[in-house]
Image (cartoon, helix red, strand yellow):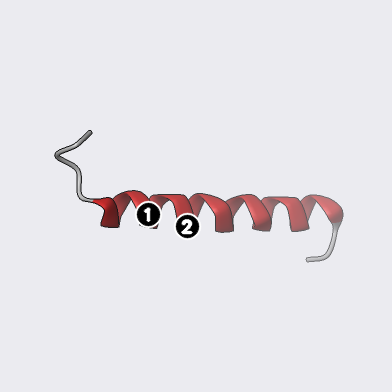
C-alpha cells in the first residue's frame, strides 16, 4: 500500500464519490 502513490488513490476516491452522487441523484430522480 505504501508503494502506491497518493495520486491514483485520490483519483479513485474522487471517482467513487462522483459515481455515488450520480447514483443517488438518479435514484432520487433529479436526472
Q: Residue 4: x and y, percent? A: 19, 43
Q: How many residues crowd around disc 1 within 10 Å: few (fewer than 14), some, or many (20 or more)?
A: few
Question: Which circle marks residue 14 in the picture?
Answer: 2
Image quadrant assignment for residue 22:
bottom right
Confirm or deny contact between disc 2 and disc 1 (CB under 8 A): yes
Q: Quadrant of the N terminus?
A: top left
Q: Quadrant of the C terminus?
A: bottom right
Q: Secondary structure at mark 1?
A: helix
Q: Residue at x 76, y 58 (%)?
A: 25
Q: Residue 24: x and y, percent? A: 74, 51
Relative side of 9 to 29, left or right: left
Residue projecting furthest to the bottom: 31
Q: As rendered, which of 3 and 21 lies closer to the eye? A: 3
Q: Residue at x 28, y 57 (%)?
A: 7
Relative side of 6 to 29, left or right: left
Say which residue label 1 marks.
10
The relative height of residue 3 versus residue 28 in the rendered view (above or below) is: above
Amino acid at each position: 500500500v505504501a508503494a502506491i502513490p497518493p495520486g491514483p488513490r485520490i483519483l479513485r476516491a474522487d471517482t467513487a464519490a462522483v459515481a455515488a452522487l450520480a447514483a443517488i441523484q438518479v435514484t432520487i430522480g433529479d436526472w
